[in-house]
Image (spheres, rainbow, N blue to C red):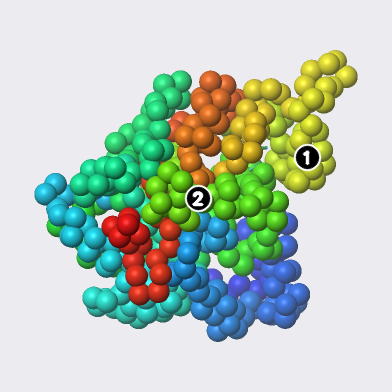
């Protein structure tokens, strides 16, 4: 066995051994993909050195400076940390500005593969793997800096949804947010550490939530991700080809001039009860969403992106897509309800007596959550077949200010004008 480990897994051992029994065609398919690219030939070991040396994933970068913050329309990276802070009572406006300035300076460096300014281990920042750092301001931020009149009208915590909510303080609210995403979890951890440790005394960490999607390189690019229920999740999401992101995702500055080019983030931590989900049969699971599990096609179609026909009925006159299914309830009633969903899965250590602690860090971006998010969430709270297996346990809303100009910092526009 030790011998085999030192030589790596041969293709034959993968295909005939226990791994194949568990994952079946998946393992064969993934490895066959490498074979096509010359990394793996029949009967040879996977040449991990060649894969690693290419550093394609590690060396990729995303910009920090610009009109918009990165991390909203950026193609979702594999790993994410959402870290919220409360401003320490008595902190001055200048000190809080200092936090935003320090975060921006460090984020500008880290995203380009350089250590933070006070980084003891700058080597950890190498190979940033598309790191993005997105900074958000919660409703309490504006009182804390003595600028309540600069708070966007829509920036409030969501109203309670008593039919579904079981919110816990340890996953909810916050005055400041760091959203840190990268294709490498080490990069995420390092960035979170550097950014959080420099602001003690002014901002106190309130919660931290980690999420993941498929690892890069394991899926053909462009494929919609699956959540831990196995559903293809993210099909009906606006694309820049279809809609003007300036109109649905970004503020025009009419409410608050400094927010022009900024956005809003709604983050809901939604627990998914795997045990009871797995008790129902596949047909019932598909009916609860209104889409098939294999292709993600609507129950009235055959391919993922076929338009759903909510009027279609079966031979006995029942709607093919049940009116209480998730997509029938969530679908846009008008253009104002368009939001960009960018969810991450979580799978944390189980609580006492449980065997899993699994769910979705549901994130959605839009220009105005009162216009866009609340009506959709209200409909889902009133009726959504998925509610049987999903429980919102955390909730937070943040303003995502416009991007920082070169040499400037996120939030600068707020203090300037
Ligand atoms: C754990 C909780 C949730 C799960 C597992 C889930 C899963 C899904 C799945 C599988 C789809 C169909 C594929 C797609 O278009 O992405 C979908 C669609 C959608 N979901 Fe969710 N979702 C959850 C929570 C939410 C929440 C909280 C909202 C917003 C309040 C939401 C809004 C939407 C919207 C707008 C669509 C597109 C509907 C359409 O036009 O077809 N979802 N979701």
Assign a secondary structure to mark 1: loop
- What numbered label is drawn on residue 307? 1
The residue lying toward the viewer, choosing from 93 and 265, is 93
Assign ligand 1 to one image quadrant: top right
Residue 45, percent across and down?
Answer: 64, 78
Relative to 2, residue 394 above or below = above
**Residue 171 sits in quarter:** top left
Q: Quadrant of residue 217?
A: bottom right
Residue furthest out toward the left: 90
- Relative to 372, does residue 201 appear above or below in the rendering? below
Residue 174 shows in the view: no
| Mark drawn on residue 260 | none
- Is residue 63 among what the camera can see? yes
Residue shown at 53% from the left, 37% from the top: 372
Quarter containing the C terminus:
bottom left
Q: Is residue 241 above or below residue 198?
A: above
Q: Dot 2 corresponds to which residue? A: 252
User: Crowding near pointer 2: few (<14 within 10 Å), some, many (20+)?
Assistant: some
Helix, strand, or loop for circle 2?
loop
Q: Position of residue 69 (x, y in %)?
A: 45, 61
State the residue at coordinates (40%, 33%).
158
Residue 224 is left or right of residue 210, and the answer is right
């Amino acid at each position: 066995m030790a011998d085999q480990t030192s030589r790596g897994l041969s293709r034959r051992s993968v295909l005939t051994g226990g791994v194949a029994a568990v994952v079946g065609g998946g393992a064969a398919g993934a490895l066959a993909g490498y074979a096509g690219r010359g990394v793996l030939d029949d009967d040879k070991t996977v040449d991990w050195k060649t894969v690693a040396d290419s550093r394609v994933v590690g060396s990729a970068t995303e910009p920090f400076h610009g009109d918009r913050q990165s991390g909203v329309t950026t193609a979702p990276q594999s790993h994410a940390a959402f870290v919220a802070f409360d401003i320490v009572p008595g902190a001055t406006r200048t000190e809080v500005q200092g936090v935003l300035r320090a975060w921006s300076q460090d984020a500008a460096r880290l995203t380009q593969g350089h250590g933070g300014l006070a980084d003891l281990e700058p080597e950890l920042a190498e190979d940033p793997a598309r790191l993005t750092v997105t900074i958000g301001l919660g409703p309490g931020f504006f009182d804390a800096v003595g600028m309540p009149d600069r708070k966007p009208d829509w920036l409030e915590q969501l109203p309670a949804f008593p039919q579904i909510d079981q919110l816990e303080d340890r996953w909810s609210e916050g005055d400041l947010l760091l959203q840190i995403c990268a294709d490498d979890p080490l990069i995420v951890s390092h960035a979170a550490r550097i950014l959080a440790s420099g602001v003690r005394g002014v901002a106190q960490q309130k919660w931290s939530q980690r999420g993941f999607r498929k690892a890069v390189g394991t899926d053909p690019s462009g494929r919609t991700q699956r959540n831990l229920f196995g559903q293809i999740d993210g099909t009906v999401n606006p694309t820049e080809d279809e809609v003007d992101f300036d109109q649905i995702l970004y503020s025009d500055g009419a409410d608050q001039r400094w927010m022009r080019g900024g956005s809003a983030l709604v983050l809901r931590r939604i627990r998914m009860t795997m045990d009871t989900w797995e008790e129902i049969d596949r047909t019932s699971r598909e009916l609860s969403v209104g889409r098939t599990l294999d292709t993600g096609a609507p129950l009235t179609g055959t391919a993922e992106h076929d338009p759903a026909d909510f009027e279609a009925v079966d031979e006995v006159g029942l709607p093919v897509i049940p009116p209480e299914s998730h997509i029938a309830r969530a679908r846009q009633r008008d253009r104002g309800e368009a939001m960009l969903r960018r969810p991450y899965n979580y799978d944390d250590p189980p609580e006492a007596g449980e065997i899993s602690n699994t769910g979705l860090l549901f994130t959605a971006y839009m220009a105005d959550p009162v216009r866009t998010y609340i009506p959709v969430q209200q409909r889902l709270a009133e009726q959504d077949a998925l509610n049987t297996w999903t429980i919102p346990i955390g909730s937070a809303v943040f303003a995502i200010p416009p991007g920082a100009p070169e040499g400037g910092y996120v939030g600068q526009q707020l203090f300037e004008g």
